[in-house]
Every structure is written in structure tokens, then in C-alpha cells.
Image (tube, rainbow, N blue to C red):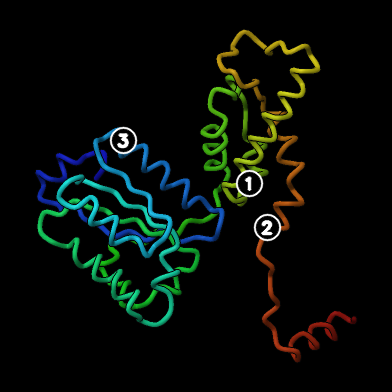
Amino acid sequence: DIEATELTRKNGTPLKKGILVAGEPGTGKTLLAHTIAHKCVEHGWTFVYVKDSDQLAQAVDLVRGRWEPAFISVEDIDRVTGGVRTDAVNDVLNVLDGIDAKGAEIVILATTNERDSICEAMRRPGRLDVVLNVTPPDAPTAEQLIRREAGYSLAPNQDLSEVSTLLAGAMPAVVVQVVQRAIRAAQRRERLEGGKPRGEFYYSSKPRIFAADLLIAARSMQEHIEWLKPPVFDERTTEEKAADRLAAGI
């Protein structure tokens, strides 16, 4: 809708939407909001970031009728709409219902770490029209994140297949940290080499990084990556565990 606003209007499709983005902390929900913010600037939309979900109504009042089309991103909506239905939940539902007025051009994107905690009253279409579950990146997505974060610091024609495979399943925040570590390592290398940039393709004030730099940084974070993984609980009963141990001769 952001990239094809006029076409959406001509087709009579409402430019009003409620979106829920769910995922574990660090999976890239905030990064998604930042990407959308850039799209809004490029295509003439107002972007409003709301860190405290109980300020959602104020954000809607701010943009309504004056700064539309508008995109409002609100963090951790489950802090207000989790659990039982309360006055705070009703306030959020009234906001979502209120922007359903004919001609409203307001999109609300809400994030949550706990999708199932969202109260049932909020889940119905019309309040939430799209539900996205953000999962850790696969290898191709990890490579895209590396290239995005590194920007012009990444030397041309680098094969990132090995490092992106190593980072598959890691949180986007980890991928960002890998790139930053690689840049710091390259800075140290340049100081030891007298501050001379490597190669004639040096276009940035940042040092050039190579696939090998990224691979070393990713390997240095493997213990941290494993630590970030959620624990796997053995859901078997005591009897089932005992039977398996007996069968294994332990």
C-alpha cells in the first residue's frame, strides 16, 4: 500500500489496516519498522513510532485528518492487550475501531513477543487484518542482512555463503553484531598497516571488510549464539524417561 498508494485508492481498497508482528526478542521486529519508516519517507507517508503502547490513541489523534496517509508503529502491544479484557484493552480496541471510519488512511503496526497473550477481542479481522510471525533468518536472509548492515564497508564481489550459512537461525541482532565486530577488526588491521585503506575500491570512511573478516567474527560469537537459543525441555513423564534409560542399558 505504501509503494502503490494512488493505485490502491483508485481500486477502492481501504488504506486502513491493523498489523500484528510477532516474534522472539531480537528477531527483527524493530528492524522491520525502521525499514517501513524509510519507505514512508520515500512515498510521502507520515511515520510515527510509539514506544509506549498506552500512547497509541494520542498518536492516532495526532495524524488523523492532518498527516494522512500515516503509518504508526507501536511496540509491545501485549503490555496493554495481554490477558483479560480491561479498560486499557478497551481503549486500544476503541482506537482500532475508530480508524475504521470511511476514508481513513492509517496503518497501525503493533509488535509483540507473545502472540498468544493477545486478548481474543483484539484478534478479529477489522482490528487485526494481518498477523506476521517473524522467525530467525535462513542463510539467504542472513546474507541480505549482512549486506544491508555492512553497506559500502563490504568489499565488492565477496562470497558470503559460508558466513551466512553459519549465521542461519541466529537473531538479526547477532548478524548486526557480527558485522560490527568485523568492522572493528578491520579498523585495528588498518592501524597496524599504517592507516592505509585496502584496495582501490575504498569509498567509505569506514574500513573495508571481507568475507574472511565476517567469518572470523561469526565464529567468535558461536558460544553466544548457542547461549541465546531457548532451552529445550524434556516433556516426557518420569516413567517414560526411566523406561528409555532402561532400554538404553543405563
- Image coordinates of residue 21 in percent, x first then y, are 41, 58
Q: Which residue is mark 3?
A: 41
Residue 51 against residue 215 in the figure, above or below:
below
Q: Considering depth in this image, is 141 or 49 the residue closer to the camera?
A: 49
In this rendering, position of residue 118 left or right of residue 191: left
Tell me the CA gap for discs 3 and 1: 27 Å
Q: Which residue is pictured at 19% across the width and 52% down the height? A: 64
Specify which label sits upstream in the sequence, 1 or 2.
1
Q: Position of residue 154 (x, y in %)?
A: 59, 24
Mark-to-mark CA distance, 1 and 2: 10 Å
**Measuring 21% from the left and 39% from the top, which residue is drawn there?**
4
Above or below — where is 7 with respect to 233? above
Verify CB contact (< 8 Å) between mark 2 and mark 3.
no
Q: Is residue 91 above or below residue 12?
A: below
Quick one: label 3, few (<14), some, or many (20+) residues within 10 Å? few
Which label was assigned to residue 174?
1
Asked if residue 74 lies left or right of residue 71, the reply is right
Where is residue 75? Give x, y as percent: 43, 58
Quadrant of the image for the N terminus? top left
Which residue lies most toward the right here? 250
* Three-letter amino acid code at the position of disc 1: Val
Going by the numbered disc 2, the residue's amino acid type is: Leu
Q: Are marks 1 and 2 in contact (CB under 8 Å)?
A: yes
Quadrant assignment, res 204: top right
Q: CA distance from mark 2 to mark 3?
A: 34 Å
Q: Quadrant of residue 146?
A: top right
Q: Residue at x 74, y 87 (%)?
A: 240
Of residue 29 and residue 210, the one placed in the foreground of this image is 29
SS state under label 2: helix
Circle 1 packing at 10 Å, graded few (<14), some (14-19), many (20+), is: some
- Position of 76 with respect to 18 (left or right) is right
Q: Disc 2 marks which residue?
A: 228
